[in-house]
Amino acid sequence: MDLNYFSILCFFWAFVGILTRILIVALGDKWKEWEINKAYAKERPKWLNYIGIFGFALVIFTWYKVFTTNVGFSWIIAVLLSLTLIKLYKLTFDYNEFREFVINVFEDKTN
């Protein structure tokens, strides 16, 4: 199997997606508490700056690879990855509004 940058990116993204869904199911309410109190704490975590820089750099590098390598349909993963910039932008530059969105998502709406 010949793994190129886009294959590795796809497998990594799939692994993270599957692993987080398993953790969400396995941890239940503990996942919710971790998200609200640790990952998106009231005071904006300093590590978000590094995540923001890494995310923006990853998107730029991915588009660079689209235009400099001959990998069919590589633009699809680049577009999908670019869509994550919406979340990354809100997380980096409008943290409080993003945190309110997360809390709203986790609210129990059955009552």
Image (spheres, rainbow, N blue to C red):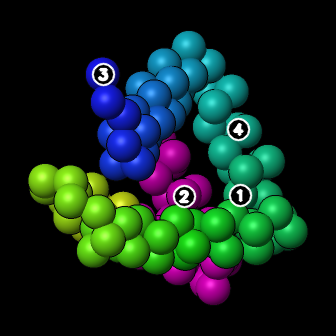
- Magenta run includes residue 110: yes
Q: Where residue 63 sits in the image (x, y, percent)? A: 35, 73
Magenta span: predominant SS is helix
Q: Is residue 92 visible?
A: yes
| Residue indicated by mark 1 | 40
Nearest to viewer (mark 3 / mark 1): 3
Type of amino acid at the residue the image marks with label 1: Tyr
Going from the N terminus, do you reach mark 4 or mark 1 first? 4
- Whether pointer 4 and pointer 1 mark residues with C-beta atoms closer than 8 Å, the reply is no
Q: Quadrant of residue 45?
A: bottom right
What is the C-alpha distance between the residues marked 3 and 1? 39 Å
Q: Secondary structure at mark 4?
A: helix
Type of amino acid at the residue the image marks with label 3: Met
Q: Quadrant of residue 47?
A: bottom right
Going from the N terminus, do you reach mark 3 or mark 1 first? 3
Going from the N terminus, do you reach mark 1 or mark 2 first? 1
Going from the N terminus, do you reach mark 2 or mark 4 first? 4
Residue at the (42%, 39%) spot, across then down: 8
Q: Secondary structure at mark 2?
A: helix
What is the C-alpha distance between the residues marked 2 and 4? 11 Å
Q: Where 78 sits versus 24, above or below?
A: below
